[in-house]
Image (cartoon, grey):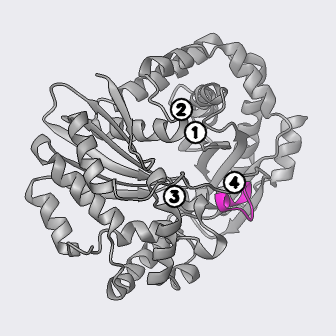
Amino acid sequence: MSAQLHRLANGMRIVTERMPGLESAAVGVWVNAGGRHERPEQNGIAHFLEHMAFKGTARRSALRIAEEIEDVGGYINAYTSREVTAYYARVLAADVPLAVDLISDIVLNPTFDPAEIEIERGVILQEIGQALDTPDDIIFDWLQEAAYPRQAMGRTILGPAERVGTFGRGDFQRFTAEHYGAGSLILSAAGAVDHDEIVRLAERLFGHLPPSAPSAADPAEWRGGEHRTRKDLEQAHLAFALPQPGYRDDAIHAAQVYAGAMGGGMSSRLFQEAREKRGLCYTIFASVSAYADTGMLTVYAGTGAEDVGALAELCVDELKRSAEDMTEAEVARARAQMKSGLLMGLESPSSRAERLARVVAIWDRVIPLSETVERIDAVDAAALRAHAEALVGTEPALALYGPVEAAPEAARLRERLVA
């Protein structure tokens, strides 16, 4: 298997990888336009726009979009993140041209019919309401806001209900004109695909777009802080974060392995100490979110009101202790988990197409899997102890939801981290 990258004259990039033995393919367009590309008055529009792409084009009604992909047994979907919006499909090999044509149509030619806008507005308001009713979902939005206050990086992807309630056809047209240019588009395909055919399709369907550079976003600045919402719930929800490198930083692999060692599985430090040894919680994990110019290490746990203070302090103590006694065995286990997760996941053409789009967006080249594995393998215990030591003294972000009266403030956790 080998990936191929091609750039159209207008700046659009096409990346493909043929996976022998497969009878299906995953194809999609990844747009360099997500939540962090929005101005304050646009907050939520990237996600709303993703919804509107499926509500009709100049050539297809909303029903016809669904029928065409399902007539051939395929499926089509989309998602919005803080840095990209993706539109993707999974089809049999013979139907790849249809999938590319359909995706190009919904990305480039949405009609933004006012009646459909109103219908979808109601759907999104329901989605916002559902998120607010899901503690272990909304808490991460509050954590992001605490870490990056008054910045695009800290605002929610769904946007506030009052803002979503105002968007009209002109708002969507302006956002696409600003951010859906050729230089911001990556067509990625994996599975039973032919690179030359995908390039020909891209030239025919996207080649008319004028040249453009990728969309830019305001730099993110980690500040840290606290969000605390008291509510009568069965559990107190705790999310704690510290700043991490962005995905273009050489330290990103150490950050990812460190998160795995601290809270990536049942053998991890936090799981063993908080759940297995002390019974302070049922769920606890650590993960790293990486962006172009910043990142965050997040620890999440749900616990009882009487244990939230002890649990928060334990998390800080374990992060601090890891700078002194992280072992080679722990690091080897975390490296193995990270590599297996990466390689097993990429047996799916959908995951492989997404990875291709992501690495091209970040590095403007295809990163061989062997190179990524080598960088993971280069992380040792000394590197992780140094990584943990660098966390001491950083400003934490803290989000709390539920019966959280006993939880310490972010400033107190910072003092405990540096003591």
- Label 1: element kind: strand
Looking at the picture, tell me which residue is in the foreground, 216 or 150.
216
Q: Is residue 223 left or right of residue 334?
A: right
- Mark identifier at residue 306: 4
| Span highlighted in magenta in the image | 145-154
Q: Is residue 120 visible?
A: yes
Of the image marks 2 and 3, the number of the one nearer the N terminus: 3
Image-quadrant location for residue 72: bottom left
At 59% from the left and 13% from the top, the residue drawn is: 378
For marks 4 and 1, give the one nearer the viewer: 1
Front one among 283 and 239: 239
Horizontal and vertical percent position of residue 152: 66, 62
Give the class, few, some or many, for how many residues have Cα within 10 Å of label 1's Cα (few <14, many ≥20): many
Q: Where does residue 318 sit, x and y in percent of width and height? A: 72, 31
Q: Which residue is mark 1?
A: 287
Q: Position of residue 34 (x, y in %)?
A: 52, 58
The mark that comes first in sequence, 3 or 1, is: 3
Give the residue at mark 3.
Answer: 33
Marks 1, 2: nearer the viewer = 1
Residue at 72% in and 64% down: 228
Under tag 2, what secondary structure?
loop
Mark 1 near mark 2, Cβ–Cβ under 8 Å? yes
Q: CA distance from mark 3 to mark 1?
A: 24 Å
Q: Is residue 38 above or below residue 214?
A: below
Residue type at numbered disc 1: Ser
Tag 4: residue type? Glu
Q: Amino acid at mark 3?
A: Ala
- Callouts 2 and 3 close, C-beta under 8 Å: no
